[in-house]
Image (tube, rainbow, N blue to C red):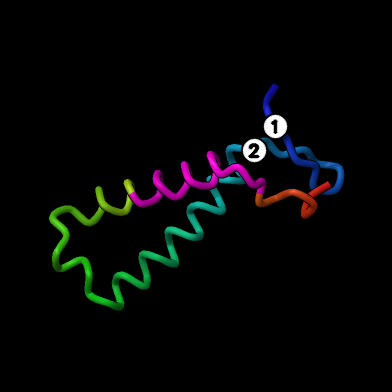
Amino acid sequence: MIPEYAIGSITVANAPLTATVAFLIALVIHRLLVALRFYRFVWHPVLFDTALFILIWALIVLSPVNPFQGLLS
């Protein structure tokens, strides 16, 4: 069964919700790395950002604690 969350009267699947959260976290980390001039040492910044997003998304999905428990009914 695919996990779903109810936001008001709308049900949202788990994947788009966790992907959006992962994207926002990756965006904040990207801005921090730009400010620290970290990308001078990265061979392919777009590839690095994509891998960062996938790793963050995997950590959110595979975490034993549900970050949305109780927030959405």
Secondary structure under the numbered disc 2 in the rendered image: helix
Where are the magenta residues, as a range?
Answer: 52-66
Q: Which residue is mark 2?
A: 14
Q: Which residue is mark 1?
A: 3
Residue drawn at point x = 53 percent, y = 45 percent: 19
What residue occupies the far top of the structure in this picture? 1
- Location of residue 38 (image quadrant): bottom left
- Asked if marks 2 and 1 touch (Cβ < 8 Å), the reply is yes
Q: Nearer the viewer, residue 45 or 62?
A: 62
Q: Which quadrant holds the N terminus? A: top right
Secondary structure under the numbered disc 1 in the rendered image: loop
Measured in 3D between alpha carbons, the distance from the residue under mark 2 to the one under mark 1, in whole angstroms, is: 6 Å
Residue 73 image position (x, y, % from top left): 84, 46
Q: Is residue 62 above or below residue 44?
A: above
- Location of residue 10 (image quadrant): top right
Would you say residue 65 sits in the magenta stretch? yes
Q: Is 69 placed left or right of 24 in the picture? A: right
Residue 35 image position (x, y, % from top left): 30, 78
Q: Nearer the viewer, residue 64 or 19?
A: 64
Residue drawn at point x = 48 percent, y = 54 percent: 23
Q: Is 70 placed left or right of 50 in the picture? A: right
Check disc 2 and give the amino acid type.
Answer: Asn
Q: Nearer the viewer, residue 70 or 19?
A: 70
